[in-house]
């Protein structure tokens, strides 16, 4: 292909041509996943041996009730149909990044036609009473990392009547078989829900809105859109913000979820404060809480937010960039580009009748988050 010839002409050592019919979120065991694993020093042959073992276990030669992929997919799909459509993952710290892959795989594959399975990752576990009856808990952990706290959490959830799935891994190389198992399970769950798990029909719309807003910047020099109401956390309209948050949270119903969509720099201090807000909302409202950094989530849970059930309350957070960089060849900066992505996504949520608000934190993100947390606590005090 022309791309290969170009790469060869520039002195590349080796070019790996992936099969072009593999969707990105199903590509962990293709060159897209295996080449980085090899470059990281992982034992890729053993990783593949274990994935081949799982492929055999998920094949047609075994009874369905012994098929790991079909059994897991059936649990996911049938429980989702019964209302337990928030799959909460509790994963060993050393393989916690697996949650990000599972998030995209499940949300983007199943969130469409007003149904779907919402993955909840990186949410610290709490006592059983903070959870609603819309949860399925899945523990994925390494044998050597099992501890009494983990096992105590499992026991407490089971005693409280929550469904729990436990996947115990020997070591990290078992990720190979888990990739395969979860891809099969996702396809099975999609079949049970009656949707196509291999498309993502609502992802493109936010991109199109971003392009339209950037065209507006080219023509007028402005990104402002009068149809979207954004609150400035540092404004003098304290009463309006407080009342607005109260009204927003009063819309929450059992079985809903709260999504924090942070178009912010992903730093430890920012994440620490967002997690505090997230857990407060979960414990106070007894709703699943999601924390996402934009624009990454547009290609994962973004599909679920628009195509899934209308059960989300969306709080979008933006900020000014302390340092901004112009994009060569266009009359706007990377900061404007990011704001256009955020605004374009809000417009799509508004179009689909989602409950959402946007809050601008200004330049001092930490101070802005602390103010927001104070407003949220005040808004929920009287509930």
Image (cartoon, rainbow, N blue to C red):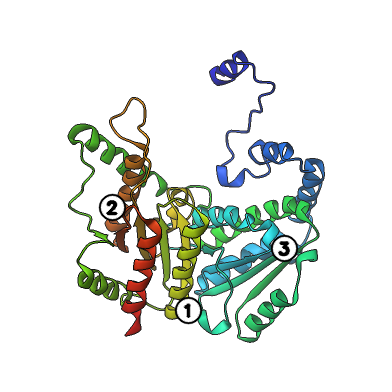
Quarter in which the C terminus is drawn? bottom left
Q: Which mark is residue 283?
A: 1
Percent x, y for residue 156? Answer: 65, 83
Residue 122, quarter of picture: bottom right
At a point 50% along the width and 79% down the height, the residue shown is 132
Residue 40, quarter of picture: top right
Residue that carries the numbered disc 2 in the rendered image: 347
Residues at marks 2 and 3, CA–CA distance in whole angstroms:
44 Å
Depth check, front residue: 53 or 12 = 12
Percent x, y for residue 273? Answer: 46, 65
Question: Considering the numbered disc 2 on the image, is that residue within a helix, a strand or a loop?
Answer: helix
Quarter in which the N terminus is drawn? top right
Residues at marks 2 and 1, CA–CA distance in whole angstroms:
29 Å
At a point 37% along the width and 62% down the height, the residue shown is 367
Depth check, front residue: 28 or 97 = 97
Residue 91, quarter of picture: bottom right
Residue that carries the numbered disc 3 in the rendered image: 64
Q: Is residue 59 visible?
A: no
Between discs 3 and 1, the one toward the N terminus: 3
The reply, left or right, for residue 58 in relation to residue 224 is right
Query: From the viewer's perspective, is residue 131 above or below residue 21?
Result: below
The reply, left or right, for residue 162 in relation to residue 377 is right
Depth check, front residue: 54 or 159 = 159
């Amino acid at each position: 292909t022309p791309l290969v010839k170009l790469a060869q002409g520039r002195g590349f050592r080796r070019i790996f041509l992936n099969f072009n019919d593999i969707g990105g979120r199903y590509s962990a065991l293709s060159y897209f996943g295996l080449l980085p694993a090899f470059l990281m020093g992982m034992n890729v042959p053993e990783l593949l041996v274990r994935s081949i073992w799982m492929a055999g276990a998920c094949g047609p030669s075994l009874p369905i009730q012994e098929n790991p992929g079909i059994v897991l997919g059936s649990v996911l799909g049938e429980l989702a149909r019964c209302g337990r459509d928030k799959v909460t993952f509790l994963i060993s710290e050393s393989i916690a990044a697996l949650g990000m892959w599972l998030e995209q795989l499940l949300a983007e594959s199943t969130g469409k036609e007003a149904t779907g399975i919402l993955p909840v990752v990186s949410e610290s576990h709490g006592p059983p009473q903070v959870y609603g009856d819309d949860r399925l808990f899945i523990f994925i952990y390494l044998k050597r990392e099992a501890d009494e706290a983990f096992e105590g959490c499992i026991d407490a959830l089971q005693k409280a009547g929550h469904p729990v799935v436990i996947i115990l891994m020997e070591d990290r190389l078992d990720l190979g078989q888990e990739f395969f198992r979860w891809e099969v399970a996702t396809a099975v769950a999609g079949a049970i829900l009656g949707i196509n798990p291999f498309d993502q029909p609502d992802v493109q719309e936010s991109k199109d809105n971003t392009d339209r807003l950037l065209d507006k910047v080219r023509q007028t020099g402005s990104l402002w859109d009068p149809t979207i109401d954004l609150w400035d956390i540092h404004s003098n309209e304290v009463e309006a913000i407080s009342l607005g948050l109260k009204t927003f949270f009063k819309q929450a119903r059992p079985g809903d979820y709260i999504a924090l969509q942070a178009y912010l720099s992903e730093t430890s201090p920012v994440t620490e404060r967002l997690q505090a807000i997230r857990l407060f909302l979960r414990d106070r409202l007894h709703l699943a809480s999601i924390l996402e950094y934009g624009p990454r989530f547009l290609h994962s849970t973004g599909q679920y937010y628009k195509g899934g059930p209308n059960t989300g309350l969306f709080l979008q957070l933006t900020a000014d960039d302390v340092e901004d960089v112009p994009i060569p060849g266009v009359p706007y900066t990377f900061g404007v580009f990011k704001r256009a992505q955020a605004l374009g996504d809000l417009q799509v949520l508004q179009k689909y009748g989602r409950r959402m608000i946007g809050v601008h934190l200004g330049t001092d993100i930490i101070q802005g988050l602390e103010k927001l947390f104070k407003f949220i606590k005040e808004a929920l005090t009287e509930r």
